[in-house]
Amino acid sequence: AQTVTQSQPEMSVQEAETVTLSCTYDTSESNYYLFWYKQPPSRQMILVIRQEAYKQQNATENRFSVNFQKAAKSFSLKISDSQLGDTAMYFCAFPPGNTGKLIFGQGTTLQVKP
Amino acid sequence: EPEVTQTPSHQVTQMGQEVILRCVPISNHLYFYWYRQILGQKVEFLVSFYNNEISEKSEIFDDQFSVERPDGSNFTLKIRSTKLEDSAMYFCASSGGSRTDTQYFGPGTRLTVL
């Protein structure tokens, strides 16, 4: 079965510092893509970043970047210069078979402290 | 910027009643999805919809559930006879012209079954 695992249920970071959230997944596919979504207390699901598996370069969106290790099936999210507004639950997600159906990890709750 | 909208934001119903959750996907999107998130748990796929028919459904999506695109803009999820365990946040999502396009989520409908 294809799975997504986030092993850190909770993390905290001081404002302005850097934090890395981990995600591993299991698949036998070679071409796929991965996502990080953010869910603030409002519970809205907001896209943070997308990574294509065929791309060597790690995706970056402003303060958010990924460390994609295809061989290790690892897809971690790095948040630089953390801000109070980054406080949220973060979900890693993967669509097996490129069907569109997203499988989500269990989520990591991130608390940014002033 | 176009966004997915959902109504109502919160629905309270009695066990055994029928509910209809409504979504307006982004206007030029072709793929539509419903997901569910029980409080404190991960997001789970329910169903995907394309070209006026269900593309894929999960084990959760049993005969009590149905989806419909009654006109060119709305996408609905109906639960015929609600159970206590249907209490959850329900998210609608849409993506563009391909299954591999990024999914954008609505703000969710919180369903409470009493």
Image (tube, rainbow, N blue to C red):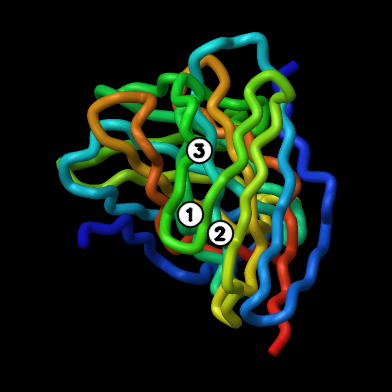
Camera-nearest label, 3 or 1: 3
Residue at image x 74%, y 57%? Answer: A108
SS type, badge 1? strand
Q: Is residue B52 above or below residue B13?
A: above
Horizontal and vertical percent position of residue A86:
58, 72
Q: Which mark is residue A110?
A: none
Q: Mark 2 or 1 closer to N-term? A: 2
Crowd band around label 1 with a 10 angstrom C-alpha radius: few (<14), some (14–19), many (20+): some
SS type, badge 2? strand
Residue at image x 49%, y 14%? Answer: A31
Horizontal and vertical percent position of residue A12:
78, 71
Q: Is residue A16 left or right of residue B26?
A: right
Report the Cα–Cα distance between label 3 and label 2: 19 Å
Crowd band around label 2 with a 10 angstrom C-alpha radius: few (<14), some (14–19), many (20+): many
Name the amino acid type tagged 2: Lys
Which residue is tagged 1?
A: A48
Name the amino acid type tagged 3: Asn
Look at the image and tell me whether residue A33 can be seen: yes
Which residue is tagged 3?
A: A58
Camera-nearest label, 2 or 1: 1
SS type, badge 3? loop
B43 or B72: nearer the viewer: B43
Q: Chain of mark 3?
A: A
Q: Mark 3 or 2 closer to N-term? A: 2
Q: Are marks 3 and 1 on the same chain?
A: yes
Camera-nearest label, 3 or 2: 3
Look at the image and tell me whether residue B84 can be seen: no
Q: Chain of mark 2?
A: A
Mark 2 vs 1: CB contact within 8 A: yes
Residue at image x 34%, y 32%? Answer: B101
Q: How many numbered circles does the render carry?
A: 3
